Amino acid sequence: MGRCNGRCTLVGFCCLQLVAALERQIFDFLGYQWAPILANFLHIMAVILGIFGTIQYRSKYLMVYAVWLVLWVGWNAFIICFYLEVGRLSQDRDFIMTFNTSLHRSWWMENGPGCLVTPVLNSNLAPEDHHVITVSGCLLDYQYIEVVSSATQIFLALFGFVYACYVSKVFLEEEDSFDFIGGFDSYGYQAPQKTSHLQLQPLYT
């Protein structure tokens, strides 16, 4: 039962990660955030691999999943630093999220809760195929929405990492205690001995 609880908990966390990643992928597509889109895709593949490894008792798949979660935590920590403009990072100068291919920002910038978007007409600041807008009245700025989203991803990844290591350890211990090739040899099972049908009778003289 304990093993089942660990596996079931890990599958549950993987499902939560999958839902959160798909939700994030949708909004990143809407905002043309190509770097997060690529990272989300890799994360979704790793989570599916983790679910498969948990269900099929594949410890190696869980190890790959756990290693990816370490990278995923680092990526989300970078996103938090980027939107909070830690150090020399600047949203106005660095367009890392779009691979410097466009000036698009987060989808939440114009569509956040309570945000009022006002286009600025006849502005000389706008490059070709772009327009200048002003955003006001937001109940929560888009930077903090992105920070909360990344923090949620880190929270789920940390729990997933712990359970992935635990379940993988259980699988490895079971592999060591049971010989899948030899069958029940490790449990002291012995094949029945062949007995001779020839019985010896006493010789009377």
Image (cartoon, rainbow, N blue to C red):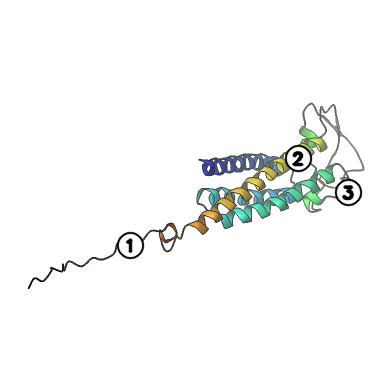
- Residue beneath the point at 83% across and 33% down: 141
Q: Quadrant of the C terminus?
A: bottom left
Q: Is residue 164 visible?
A: yes
Does 45 sit above or below residue 13? below
- Residue beneath the point at 78% across and 50% down: 98
Q: Nearer the viewer, mark 2 or mark 1?
A: 1
Three-letter amino acid code of the residue under disc 3: Leu
Question: Does the residue at mark 1 contact the one at mark 3 (Cβ under 8 Å)?
Answer: no
Q: Earlier in the sequence, mark 2 or mark 3?
A: 3
Where residue 151 is drawn, which disc sits there? 2
Q: Earlier in the sequence, mark 2 or mark 1?
A: 2
Q: On the picture, is 89 further left or further right than 20?
A: right
Q: Farthest residue toward the bottom?
A: 205
- The residue at which mark 3 appears reads as 89
Three-letter amino acid code of the residue under disc 2: Ala
> Residue 87: x, y in percent?
91, 48
Label 2 sits on a secondary structure element that is: helix
- The residue at which mark 1 appears reads as 191
Which one is in front, 126 or 20?
Answer: 20
Q: Farthest residue toward the left?
A: 205
Which one is in front, 193 or 77?
Answer: 193
> Separation of disc 2 and disc 3 at Cα?
18 Å
Label 1 sits on a secondary structure element that is: loop
Q: Which class describes the residues within 10 Å of circle 3: few (<14), some (14-19), or many (20+)?
A: some
- Residue beneath the point at 51% across and 52% down: 57
Three-letter amino acid code of the residue under disc 1: Ala
> Residue 39: x, y in percent?
70, 51
Q: Nearer the viewer, mark 2 or mark 3?
A: 2
